[in-house]
């Protein structure tokens, strides 16, 4: 008779080990930051609450996803590569092209002649000082339909690097468009 309770205790302990131990180990791994969460986005998420209204600017295309680029004062090869990538990325969106609007932000001194030379006819919007101050490093920025700046792609050097970044931007945009119910 004494052997039966021991058998039940062994089964109970084994049951606890099988079900409780994985939960305890997972809790320890998460609490000591031993787990590195994977991210599928290739651009840099903008965590601050930056939107058109915070920047005192009206949304040029409300209810539409936007790809922004601030045209610098002198458009050198890096600028031309960025414009090329913006143009090709827009074309590569295919059926989703009607949901996305590429926008060239211009200031008083922007080199608009380059747009004419490259035959790029995207919408040109005057940038205010606050937005121009954010985009001084020739970043490409994705804006959601509600007007929040959500992701940026920093400047890279070289045409091949720009093309690779354009592919990354397309992949990110397609994921966001797939998950979006707005715009």
Image (cartoon, rainbow, N blue to C red):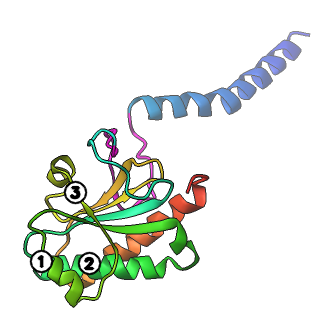
Q: Where on the picture, by quarter, is residue 4?
A: top right
| Residue receiving disc 2 | 83
Q: Give the farthest residue toward the right.
A: 1
Q: Is residue 117 above or below residue 150?
A: below
**Element at badge 2?**
helix
| Label 3 vs label 1, nearer the camera | 3
- Magenta segment, which residues? 33-52
Q: Where on the picture, by quarter, is residue 156?
A: bottom left
Residue 136 in the image, given as x and y percentages of width and height: 14, 58
- In front: 164, or 93? 93
**Residue 99 shown in magenta:** no
Q: Is residue 49 left or right of residue 64?
A: left
Q: Where on the picture, by quarter, is residue 69?
A: bottom left
Which of the numbered marks, if any, corresponds to residue 75?
Answer: 1
* Mark 3–mark 2 CB contact (< 8 Å): no
Q: From the image, give the main secondary structure of the stretch colored magenta.
A: loop
* Mark 1–mark 2 CB contact (< 8 Å): yes
């Amino acid at each position: 008779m004494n052997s039966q309770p021991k058998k039940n205790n062994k089964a109970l302990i084994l049951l606890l080990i099988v079900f409780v131990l994985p939960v305890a180990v997972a809790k320890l791994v998460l609490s000591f930051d031993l787990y590195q969460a994977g991210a599928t986005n290739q651009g840099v998420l903008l965590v601050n609450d930056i939107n058109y209204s915070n920047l005192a600017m009206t949304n040029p295309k409300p209810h539409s996803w936007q790809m922004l680029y601030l045209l610098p004062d002198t458009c050198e090869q890096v600028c031309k590569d960025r414009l090329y990538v913006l143009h090709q990325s827009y074309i590569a969106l295919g059926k989703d092209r009607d949901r996305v609007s590429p926008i060239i932000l211009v200031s008083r001194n922007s080199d608009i002649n380059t747009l004419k030379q490259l035959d790029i006819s995207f919408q040109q919007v005057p940038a205010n000082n606050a937005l121009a101050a954010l985009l001084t490093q020739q970043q490409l920025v994705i804006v959601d339909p509600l007007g929040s700046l959500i992701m940026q792609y920093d400047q890279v050097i070289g045409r091949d690097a720009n093309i690779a970044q354009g592919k990354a931007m397309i992949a990110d945009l397609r994921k966001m468009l797939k998950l979006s119910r707005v715009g």
